[in-house]
Structures are given as C-alpha cells and as structure tokens.
Amino acid sequence: MEKLEQLYEGKAKRIYRTTEEDVVWVSYKDSATAFNGEKKAEIEGKGRLNNEISTILFELLKEKGIESHFVKRVSETEQLVKKVTIIPLEVVVRNIAAGSLSKRTGLPEGQILPKTILEYYFKNDDLGDPLINEDHIDILNIATKEQLEIISEQAFQINEVLTSYFAQKNVKLVDFKLEFGVDRDGQLLLADEISPDTCRLWDAETNEKLDKDVFRRELGSLTDAYETILKRLGGLSCTK
Ligand code: C5P
C-alpha cells in the first residue's frame, strides 16, 4: 500500500489517502497543543511516543474483543487506520476527579468518584468543545440514540480493559477521551487515538502526572513522562 496526498491536517496528526480506498495513513506530529490551541509547542519525539502507545492500546483492545479503526503500525510515527467519518463528539470517561470536572464541580483533584462517569463534549473548535447532554446530541443530530447506546456501552468496556491493564503497570487511569466514527458500511468504530495526550495517567504510588498535564501545567519534560508510560507498557523506548 502506498501513501498518497494529504487529506487533512489536525492539531496532532496528518491524514493521507492511500492506494486503498477504505484505509488512510496517519502520521503523528510532534506538535503539542492545549486549551483549544491557545498553547502550542513542537516537542521532538512526541509523535513517535503517541504512535507507539496508541498502537499498544488499540492492539490490547482488539485482543479483548473491542474493534477500532486501527489496522497496523507502519513506522515509528505512522499507522494505518480504516477510513471513518468522525462523529463530532468527545466522549470522556472519568474514574477520579481532575481537570474540568474539578473546575466545574469543586470536587478536589484526586478524589475517587463513587462511580465511573461519562461526559459528552460537542467537538467544535468555534464553540470551544462545550459539554452537552443526550438531548443536545439528539436535537443537533450528532449521533442517533442507537449509536449513543453503543458508544456509552463501549466506553465503559474500554474503561474496564484499560483501567485493569494500567493498574498492572502501576499507573492510575484517571480519565480519558474517546472518539468514534462510522465506516463506509455504516459500522460504528472506536477511532482517533488513545495516548497520554488523551488520557490522564498518574503513577499509582506517587500520583506523578505522566500525561499531557505535564505540558498544560508546565510540570517538567513531556517526553520523559510519555517515555515512562511507553516503557511500563513494554514498548521500545528510544535512546535519546
Ligand atoms: O479537560 P478535561 O478534564 O475535561 O479532560 C478530560 C480528559 O479528556 C483528559 O484525559 C483529557 O486529556 C482528555 N481530553 C482530550 N481532548 C480534549 C479534551 C479533553 O483528549 N479536547
């Protein structure tokens, strides 16, 4: 399969057409952005780390019976994925209070939630990705009731798999964001990426932050944090 022209460039990835109609070529960039693109930096090695970590997590989910758009990793920074139309919804799963949940509700960062919760955000840069509910999703035709039912069921299943996997690696899965898409046959599929850019990951003993909060809050070296995660997941770490 060959990589053809670029179809799209997002904040963290570039998407290219391939010689196969149903497959696109994803290249993870070294760009880091936060606060809806207000804070930006180029961080050498970030693309490789997210590509490797996302590959490991999509392969784990597949082993556990959860399909995604992921096809295969093709290089240090690239992977092939099934072409899908992304549903403009950010699905956030939370186990422990942090980030915007703490800000919105006053729950202290680090407080274990009495139950895992789901939140939906409308993926829309102009509106700043607002928090929305199922009625909003319905009236805006973002997803059908059936799709939303599958999305929420899968989100909880993914949380079960990832929480126990990370726990074995001495990492707490605080919260994470998922995106879903629909392929040419109308099948709903987990899409985008699962990486320290999209998850909050804390060391299980020290609560050291090993995710994008290191960049958002300027807590140290982002690549050191992501490298720690990759090593704990058993991935190959690069000699710096
Ligand atoms: O900022 P907030 O607390 O709502 O983020 C919840 C989770 O969703 C975090 O793991 C964060 O990294 C992820 N997220 C994301 N992309 C966004 C917003 C949040 O990956 N646009």
Image (cartoon, grey):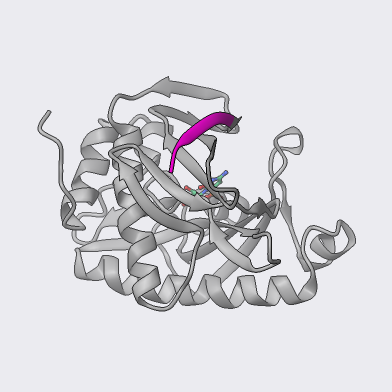
Residue depicted at 70% across the width and 71% down the height: 148
165 shown above or below 71: below
63 shown above or below 183: below
Asked which quadrant contains residue 164, the reply is bottom left
19 shown above or below 90: above
| Percent position of residue 45, x then y | 28, 30
Asked which quadrant contains residue 84, the reply is bottom right
| Percent position of residue 214, x then y | 34, 37
Residue depicted at 48% across the width and 70% down the height: 67
Q: How many marks?
A: 0
**Can you say which quadrant of the picture contains the C terminus?**
top left
Side of 153 relative to 235 (left or right): right
**Can you say which quadrant of the picture contains the N terminus?**
top left
Inspect this view and state whether residue 12 appears: no
- Between 179 and 118, the residue placed more toward the observer is 179
- Between 113 and 68, the residue placed more toward the observer is 68
Inspect the magenta stretch and tell me whether residue 38 lies in it: no
Inspect this view and state whether residue 159 appears: yes
Side of 165 relative to 33 (left or right): left
Residue furthest out toward the left: 239
Residue depicted at 65% across the width and 60% down the height: 183
Asked which quadrant contains residue 162, the reply is bottom left
Residue depicted at 38% across the width and 28% down the height: 30
| Percent position of residue 217, x then y | 40, 33
| Percent position of residue 180, x then y | 61, 59
**Helix, strand or loop: magenta stretch:** strand
Residue furthest out toward the right: 139
- Which residues, given as a range, are shown in magenta? 1-6
